[in-house]
Image (spheres, coloured by chain):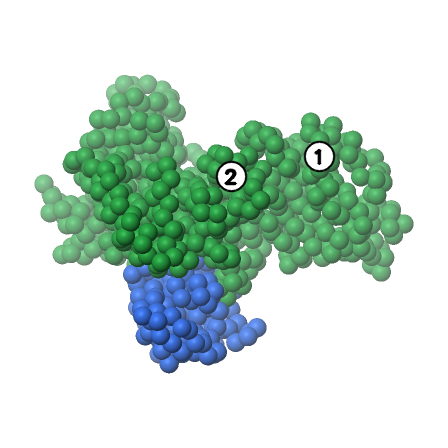
Chain colours: A green, B blue
C-alpha cells in the first residue's frame, strides 16, 4: 500500500501530500474535478503496460478507480469496453461483493477517455484476469475506509464493525448502523493501492461465484442500448467513402461532379479520403453511386488455394521456442514417425455491428463515439490525424456490437473525425457490410507442418512443429514430449513485409484455433496408428493435472466410449489451454457420405478457469465460443483474388446459424486454487480439431484443411483407402 | 417523389411527407429517431433490422416506406407494453440470450412474429423460424430456450 492507511486519518482532511508522494504528478486539478465521495485508485505496475500519456488531465499510472458517491452509489471507471463478453457485469459483481453493496448499486463507466484511466484495449481475455484483482482490492480498500468512518460515526470500536448491503453496523447491535451514503456525504477521501497490495488482497478474498442477470440486459432487450451508430447530433451528416475495388488498386481518376450536383450533398476530397455526405444516409449512398472512379489494378493469381505455398515461400526465417531435448534423438527413440501438413484459411470477424464512428468537433475539442476495442489508442490516432493534442480528443465507447479482435484498427474514427473537421459539422461514418468485410483484419491463412514420433509403448518422443503465419499462441506443448521444438515463421499480425494481400490481425484467441487444430489432429493421428483410444493416449502423455482434470470431467459427462478410432461412433475429442484456462471438448458428429455434409449433434466442454466470478456469464462465453467455432471449422473461408475480397456479405460468407447448433453442455471444473483466468476465448480453440477427430472416428478419413466444407469432405472420402 | 405516408408506429399514428421509395430502416433510424432497429447487412440476409408489419416479421432494410402505408409497424421500442416487458424480452434478459446485443432487437422482433403465427412452436419450428437471423456472439442456444420459455408463458 502506498498510502498511509495504518494510522488514524481525519476523513475531512484530504491528504494531498501523501498522494503526491505516491506518484510524481500534481493531482490537484484532477482531484478538483472529482467532487465529493470516496475514491480508491489502483495501479498495476508492470501489468499496466501504460504508454507515455503526457499532458493528460488525469493520472496515467492509474489502472482503475472507483467512487462511492454521496448517494451511496458506486461508480467503477474502467478503460475496458463491453462488447458482449459480459465484463461489465463480472467487474461490477466483483466490486459489489468486496464492497458489500447490492449489485444494483454499481454503475459502470467504461471506455471513455475523459473519465476512465488509460487502458491499452480490451482483448486477450485479460479484463477479469488482470483488471479484476485490482478492482477487488480497490473495493476491499473502500470498504475498510467506510468501516473506519463508521466506527468513528457510531463511536464504536473499529474491529466490531461489519458491512452488508451498503450499510455499516456494529456486530453485536445491529441498530447501531449507518449507510455508506451518510458516511460519504460532504467528504472527499482518496486512497491509492499499489500492485503489492493488490496481490496480497486477492489471497484474502473469498468471492463466491454467483450468477447475476447481465447489467446490460434490460437496455439490450428494449432497444435503448446505445451503439456508436445510434448517436444523433444536430446537423449531423452521414458519410460514404469511395473505396477501391481491391487492396492493391491505385486511383487513376475520379469524377465527383455528378454527386456534387445533387441537392444537399457535400463532397470532400482530402488527402486520399474521398467522401460524399448528406443529412440522409440513403442520399449519401445514392451520391456515392454517381461518383466515377477509375483504378489501376495489378494482375494477381494469389487466391485462397495458392496462398499456402506463397506463405511458406515468403516466410523463410523461423524463430524457435520451447526447445527441449534433441530432435535427432527423439527421432531415433521413436518407433513410428508422422509428418503432416495442416492448412487454415482466412476468416472474417464479421461482428453484427460494422465499424462505426460518430464525430463532433466543438471549440477545438473532438468527441468521437466509437465502436472500438481500443479507445485509448484510438484517441492518439485521432489526435494525430486532426493535429490536435490528445487531451483535446475524447473517445466515448458506447456498447460495442461484437469485436472478436477486429475492432482495433480505428480507421472509421479517423474518417469521421477528419470529415467533421473539414465540413465543420458532426459526421457519422457507418461502414456497410461490404466495407466491413473489405477492411477487416482477417485471421490469417496459415500452414503448420508437424513431424512427431512415438515409441512402442505409446509415449511421444518427438515433436517438431513449424507454424507459418499463425504465431505460437496455442502452439506451446501441453504434452510431455522430451524432444520438442516449436518454430514460428511470421505471426498472426502480418507485420511490416506482410505476405498477405490485405490486413490480418487478432481473431478470438489469435492463432490458437489454427494451432490447436493441427496439434490435436496430430495427436489423434498417432493414437489411431497405435490403435489406442485417443483419450487414453492423451492421459498417458501428459502430467499436467489441470489438463487431466478437464479430460476426465468431459469424458464422464459425455459418456466417452473407449476404443481406438475409427470406431464408427462419430465421437471426437480435443483439448488445450489458452489465457490461463484449460478446456477439453468432446463431440458427436454425423457425416453424410453422399454430400460430404457434417452434422455436429452434440458438444460437451469442460473448462478449468480457476476461480469463477460469474458462472452463468462464463457459460455464456463457452457456448458462444463453441457456436462461433463451428463457423471457422465448417464454413468460413474468405475467397479472394489478390487484394480483391470476393466475400462481401452473408450470402456467400456463411457464419453459424440456428440449424447448425448442436446440443451444447458446458461444465465448469472447480478450481479455487487458481485466481480467475480468461473466459472469452479458451473454449473456441479446440473446435476445429474436435470435429476433425470426430469425422475420422465416424468415417475413417482425415481432414487436413479448415474449413471442412462438404467438397473437402467428399474429396477426402474419395481418396479413402488409397 | 414526395408524398404523404401515414401508418401506425408502435400504436401511434405517424404521418410523413417524404419520398415513399426511402427504405423503412433508415426512416426509422433518422426521421423518427428510433435507433433500436439495426443495420446489419442491408440486403435482408441477417435479420438485425427486423420489425413487425401487421404482426409479421419483416426486414426493414428491404422494405420501402410506401409498403407500410396504412399498416401497423412495431419496432423493438414498441414491443414492451409501457414499462412492462414482453415475455420474450424478460426471457432474453433473464436467460442471457444476448451478448453484444446488436442482433437482439431483430431476434426479438423475429421471435415475436414467429409466436404471432405459431404461439407454441416446437424446438424445430423455433430453429426454422429463426434461421434467417444471424448472431455472431453465439447466443443461439439461449435464444431458442428463451423463445421456448416465453411461448409457454403466453
Helix, strand or loop at label 1? It is loop
Inspect this view and state whether residue A520 appears: no
Q: Is residue A259 left or right of residue A295?
A: right
Marking on residue A379: 2
| Dot 1: chain letter | A
Q: Residue at x 32, y 74 (%)?
A: B67
User: Is residue A317 shown left or right of residue A717?
Assistant: right
Say whether marks 2 and 1 touch (CB < 8 Å): no
- The label on residue A420 is none
Chain-order first, disc 2 or disc 1: 1
Please say if A336 is above or below A708: above
Callout 2 secondary element: helix
Give the class, few, some or many, for how many residues have Cα within 10 Å of label 2's Cα (few <14, many ≥20): many
* Total numbered circles: 2
Residue A63's place in the image compared with A621, above or below, is above
Residue A353: where, in percent of width, then height?
A: 40, 53
Report x, y in % for residue A196. Answer: 66, 31
Q: Tag on residue A27? A: 1
Residue A314 in sight from this viewpoint: yes
Placement of the N terminus of chain A among the 4 image quadrants: top right
Q: Locate residue A497, reporting x and y percent.
A: 31, 26
The answer to which of A396 and A487 lies nearer the viewer is A396
Q: Residue furthest right?
A: A155
Instruction: Using a 10 Å C-alpha cutoff, classify the residue at mark 1 as few (fewer than 14 neighbours), some (14 to 19) or many (20 or more).
Output: some
Image position, residue A263 (x, y; %): 35, 58
Taking depth in this image into account, of A203 and A49 the one nearest to the observer is A49
- In the rendered image, the residue lying farthest to the bottom is B70
Q: CA distance from mark 2 to mark 1?
A: 22 Å
Q: Residue at x 55, y 46 (%)?
A: A362
Residue at x 20%, y 41% (from the top left corner)? A641
Residue at (19%, 34%) from the top-left corner? A298
Amino acid at each position: 500500500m502506498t498510502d498511509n492507511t495504518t494510522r488514524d486519518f481525519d476523513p475531512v482532511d484530504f491528504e494531498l501530500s501523501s498522494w503526491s508522494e505516491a506518484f510524481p504528478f500534481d493531482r490537484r486539478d484532477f482531484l478538483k474535478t472529482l467532487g465529493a465521495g470516496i475514491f480508491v485508485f489502483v495501479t498495476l505496475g508492470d501489468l499496466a503496460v501504460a504508454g507515455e500519456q503526457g499532458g493528460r488531465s488525469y493520472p496515467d499510472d492509474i489502472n482503475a478507480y472507483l467512487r462511492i458517491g454521496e448517494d451511496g452509489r458506486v461508480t467503477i471507471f474502467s478503460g475496458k469496453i463491453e462488447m458482449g463478453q459480459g465484463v461489465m457485469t463480472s467487474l461490477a459483481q466483483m466490486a459489489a461483493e468486496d464492497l458489500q453493496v447490492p449489485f444494483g448499486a454499481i454503475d459502470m463507466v467504461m471506455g471513455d477517455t475523459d473519465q476512465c484511466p488509460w487502458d491499452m484495449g480490451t482483448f486477450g481475455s485479460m479484463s477479469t484476469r488482470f483488471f479484476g484483482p485490482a478492482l477487488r482490492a480497490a473495493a476491499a480498500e473502500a470498504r475498510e475506509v467506510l468501516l473506519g468512518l463508521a466506527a468513528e460515526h457510531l463511536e464504536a470500536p473499529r474491529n466490531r464493525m461489519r458491512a452488508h448491503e451498503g450499510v455499516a453496523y456494529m456486530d453485536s447491535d445491529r441498530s447501531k448502523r449507518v449507510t455508506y451514503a451518510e458516511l460519504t456525504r460532504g467528504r472527499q477521501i482518496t486512497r491509492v493501492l499499489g500492485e503489492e497490495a493488490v496481490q496480497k488482497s486477492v489471497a484474502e478474498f473469498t468471492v463466491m461465484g454467483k450468477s447475476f442477470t447481465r447489467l446490460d440486459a434490460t437496455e439490450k432487450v428494449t432497444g435503448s442500448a446505445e451503439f456508436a451508430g445510434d448517436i444523433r447530433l444536430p446537423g449531423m451528416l452521414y458519410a460514404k467513402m469511395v473505396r477501391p475495388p481491391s487492396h492493391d488498386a491505385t486511383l487513376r481518376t475520379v469524377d465527383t461532379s455528378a454527386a456534387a450536383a445533387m441537392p444537399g450533398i457535400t463532397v470532400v476530397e482530402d488527402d486520399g479520403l474521398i467522401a460524399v455526405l448528406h443529412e440522409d444516409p440513403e442520399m449519401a449512398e445514392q451520391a456515392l453511386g454517381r461518383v466515377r472512379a477509375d483504378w489501376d489494378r495489378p494482375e494477381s493469381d494469389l487466391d485462397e488455394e495458392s496462398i499456402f505455398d506463397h506463405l511458406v515461400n515468403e516466410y523463410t526465417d523461423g524463430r524457435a521456442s520451447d526447445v527441449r531435448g534433441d530432435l535427432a534423438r527423439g527421432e531415433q527413440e521413436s518407433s513410428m514417425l508422422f509428418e503432416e501438413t495442416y492448412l487454415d484459411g482466412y476468416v472474417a470477424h464479421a461482428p453484427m455491428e460494422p465499424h462505426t464512428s460518430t464525430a463532433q468537433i466543438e471549440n477545438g475539442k473532438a468527441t468521437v463515439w466509437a465502436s472500438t476495442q481500443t479507445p485509448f489508442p484510438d484517441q492518439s490516432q485521432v489526435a494525430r490525424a486532426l493535429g490536435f493534442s490528445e487531451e483535446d480528443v475524447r473517445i466515448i465507447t458506447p456498447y460495442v456490437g461484437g469485436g472478436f479482435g477486429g475492432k482495433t484498427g480505428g480507421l472509421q474514427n479517423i474518417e469521421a473525425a477528419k470529415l467533421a473537421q473539414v465540413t465543420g459539422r458532426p459526421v457519422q461514418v457507418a461502414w456497410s457490410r461490404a466495407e466491413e468485410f473489405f477492411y477487416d483484419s482477417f485471421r490469417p491463412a496459415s500452414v503448420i507442418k508437424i513431424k512427431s514420433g512415438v515409441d512402442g509403448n505409446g509415449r511421444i518422443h518427438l515433436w517438431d512443429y513449424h507454424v507459418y503465419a499463425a504465431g505460437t499462441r496455442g502452439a506451446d506443448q501441453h504434452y510431455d514430449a522430451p524432444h520438442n521444438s516449436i518454430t514460428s515463421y511470421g505471426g498472426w499480425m502480418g507485420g511490416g513485409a506482410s505476405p498477405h494481400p490485405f490486413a490480418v490481425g487478432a481473431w478470438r484467441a489469435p492463432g490458437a484455433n489454427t494451432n490447436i487444430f493441427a496439434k490435436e489432429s496430430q495427436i489423434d493421428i498417432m493414437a489411431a496408428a497405435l490403435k489406442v483410444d485417443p483419450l487414453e493416449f492423451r492421459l498417458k502423455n501428459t502430467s499436467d493435472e489441470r489438463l487431466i482434470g478437464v479430460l476426465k470431467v468431459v469424458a464422464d459427462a459425455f459418456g466417452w466410449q473407449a476404443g481406438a478410432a475409427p470406431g464408427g461412433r462419430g465421437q471426437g475429442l480435443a483439448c488445450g489451454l489458452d489465457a490461463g484456462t484449460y478446456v477439453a471438448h468432446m463431440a458427436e458428429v454425423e457425416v453424410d457420405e453422399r454430400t460430404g455434409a457434417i452434422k455436429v449433434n452434440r458438444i460437451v466442454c469442460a473448462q478449468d478457469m480457476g476461480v469463477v466470478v460469474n458462472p452463468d456469464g462464463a457459460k455464456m462465453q463457452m457456448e458462444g465460443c463453441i457456436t462461433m467455432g463451428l463457423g471457422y471449422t465448417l464454413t468460413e473461408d474468405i475467397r479472394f483474388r489478390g487484394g480483391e475480397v470476393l466475400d462481401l456479405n452473408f450470402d456467400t460468407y456463411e457464419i453459424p446459424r440456428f440449424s447448425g447448433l448442436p446440443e451444447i453442455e458446458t461444465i465448469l471444473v472447480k478450481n479455487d486454487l487458481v485466481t480467475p483466468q480468461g473466459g472469452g476465448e479458451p473454449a473456441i480453440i479446440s473446435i476445429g480439431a474436435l470435429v476433425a477427430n470426430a469425422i475420422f472416428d465416424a468415417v475413417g478419413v482425415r481432414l487436413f484443411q479448415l474449413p471442412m466444407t462438404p467438397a473437402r469432405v467428399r474429396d477426402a472420402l474419395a481418396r479413402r483407402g488409397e | 417523389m414526395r408524398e404523404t405516408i401515414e401508418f401506425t408506429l408502435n400504436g401511434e399514428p405517424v404521418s410523413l411527407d417524404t419520398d415513399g421509395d426511402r427504405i423503412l430502416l433508415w426512416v426509422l433510424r433518422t426521421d423518427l429517431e428510433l435507433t433500436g432497429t439495426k443495420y446489419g447487412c442491408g440486403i435482408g440476409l441477417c435479420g438485425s433490422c427486423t420489425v413487425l408489419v401487421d404482426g409479421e416479421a419483416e426486414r426493414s432494410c428491404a422494405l420501402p416506406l410506401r409498403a407500410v402505408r396504412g399498416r401497423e409497424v412495431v419496432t423493438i421500442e414498441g414491443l414492451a407494453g409501457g414499462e412492462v416487458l414482453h415475455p420474450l424480452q424478460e426471457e432474453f434478459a433473464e436467460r442471457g440470450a444476448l451478448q453484444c446485443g446488436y442482433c437482439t432487437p431483430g431476434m426479438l422482433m423475429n421471435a415475436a412474429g414467429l409466436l404471432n403465427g405459431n404461439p407454441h412452436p416446437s424446438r424445430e419450428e423455433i430453429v426454422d423460424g429463426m434461421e434467417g437471423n444471424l448472431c455472431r456472439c453465439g447466443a443461439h442456444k439461449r435464444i431458442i430456450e428463451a423463445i421456448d420459455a416465453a411461448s409457454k408463458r403466453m
